[in-house]
Amino acid sequence: MRTKFGALVAAALLAGCATAPGGERAAVYPTQPAEAVPVEHQQVLFWDDATRSDRFRRMEDIFAGIDTAPAPSVRALPQGEAFDAETLAKVDGYLAEMNAAGIMVLQDGKVRLEKYRLGFGPEQRWTSFSVAKSFTSTLLGAAVKDGSIASLSDPVTRYLPQLSGTAYDGVTVEQVATMTSGVAWNEDYADPDSDVAKMLGIAPVAGEPQAVTYARTLTREAPAGEKWVYKTLETNLLGDIVAAATGKSLTAYAKDKIVDPAGFAGGLFWMADLTGNNIGGCCLSIRLSDYARMGQWVLEGGQPSVPEGWFAKAGAAQVDLGNGFGYGYQWWTYPGGFYGAQGIFGQYITLVPEENMVIAVVSNYPTATGDGLTRARMALWQTVIEAGKR
């Protein structure tokens, strides 16, 4: 494993950090002070199309982070039966509408569709944005299996004692995993005064993760467990909890618990914040085929890393969001009985257990989110799922 240095993570988007992991990775710092970082590198949300297309595939050249080697034994992805011409034509239309860089569809562990666009290729990596949240959740499961975290019912203060006496006092690890802490938060990416935009603007405190430092400024708006609000902060705190409990950086733990058992063909790069710790809520980079491998490994149960049956709960709707949608342990659930990881600008790992199917997509959406883009994505999924039934 090697440490990669670069510019600081964008405060506008990459909110949070991980607890100092201990050991040889405990002091990994960016080489540039905040004032030396070019402004254009900080404003990820406001990069133009050409800049996004260029940088989404090489975030390790721009931002600080920690990199891993590929798995010693790579999971083979044999070729399966290709989809029919009508399906492929529909898929091409949706990929163009989404400005997708690539798609890989596995069914029964075999590749039924693999396509690259925007000059992206099979040996390049692409950023995940919030798809990383589902990786952090999986590491939570691994820490539970290892006994590093005794119970999801534990208070977060057991692992992050700095949060004692704050709005997070009395909140459980499970409530952080489901984003139901009841702590007030603003995740509006377009608002420069939002919490998610200001989080990394807070001055680091020695010996304390930046996410914890910011969390200590927040207030409660509802009793713990009663209100769901999407908060990147809470995945950052979840990463802090895992790092504190295991004594490892998220990257190092992911190498042992995800990269190697899932058989990644390429290394995993995970961004770090000002303290040098991985950002649990965002921004790892892997190959398209490894997004698909992650999905296949999860579909098969994620062994030997997580408790038996972990994904039956993590990938189920712990929170009902209405109209068939829900939220589990950092996984989204969808109408039709499938679930997945998703990130802004069109990054997805979608698992369809009924069809033993994984759909991995990486994109450069023209905007971070949008109703039309969501409709295109849902139509793409439906087209592929229906083709998989034939």
Image: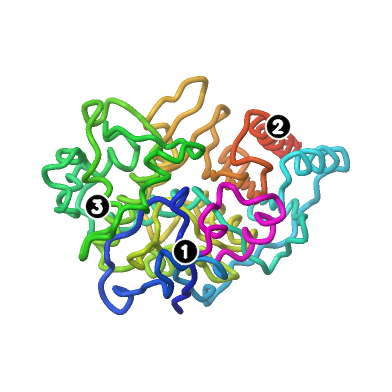
Left or right of 212, for residue 386: right
Of 112 and 326, nearer the camera is: 326
Q: Nearer the viewer's eye, disc 2 or disc 3?
A: 3
State the image coordinates of residue 306 (x, y, percent, origin top left).
37, 55
Taking the spot 69% from the left edge, 53% from the top edge, the residue there is 104
Q: Quadrant of the C terminus?
A: top right
| Vertical placement of residue 309 versus 61, above or below | above
Q: Which residues are magenta?
A: 38-59
Of 234 and 185, nearer the camera is: 185
Left or right of 160, for residue 293: right
- What amino acid is found at the position of numbered circle 2 in the picture? Ala
Type of secondary structure dominating the magenta stretch: helix
| Mark 1 lies on residue | 270
As helix, strand or loop, the secondary structure at mark 2 comes to helix
Q: Earlier in the sequence, mark 3 or mark 1?
A: 3
Q: Whole-Å distance between the Cαs marked 3 and 1?
A: 21 Å
Question: Which residue extends farthest top?
Answer: 323
Q: Earlier in the sequence, mark 2 or mark 1?
A: 1
- What amino acid is found at the position of numbered circle 1 in the picture? Trp
Left or right of 325, for residue 280: left
Taking the spot 42% from the left edge, 64% from the top edge, the residue there is 35
Q: Whole-Å distance between the Cαs marked 2 and 1?
A: 31 Å
| Mark 2 lies on residue | 379
Q: Nearer the viewer's eye, disc 3 or disc 1?
A: 3
| Mark 3 lies on residue | 213
Mark 2 crowdedness (10 Å alpha carbons): few <14, some 14-19, many ≥20: some
Q: Nearer the viewer's eye, disc 2 or disc 1?
A: 1
Of 324 and 207, nearer the camera is: 207
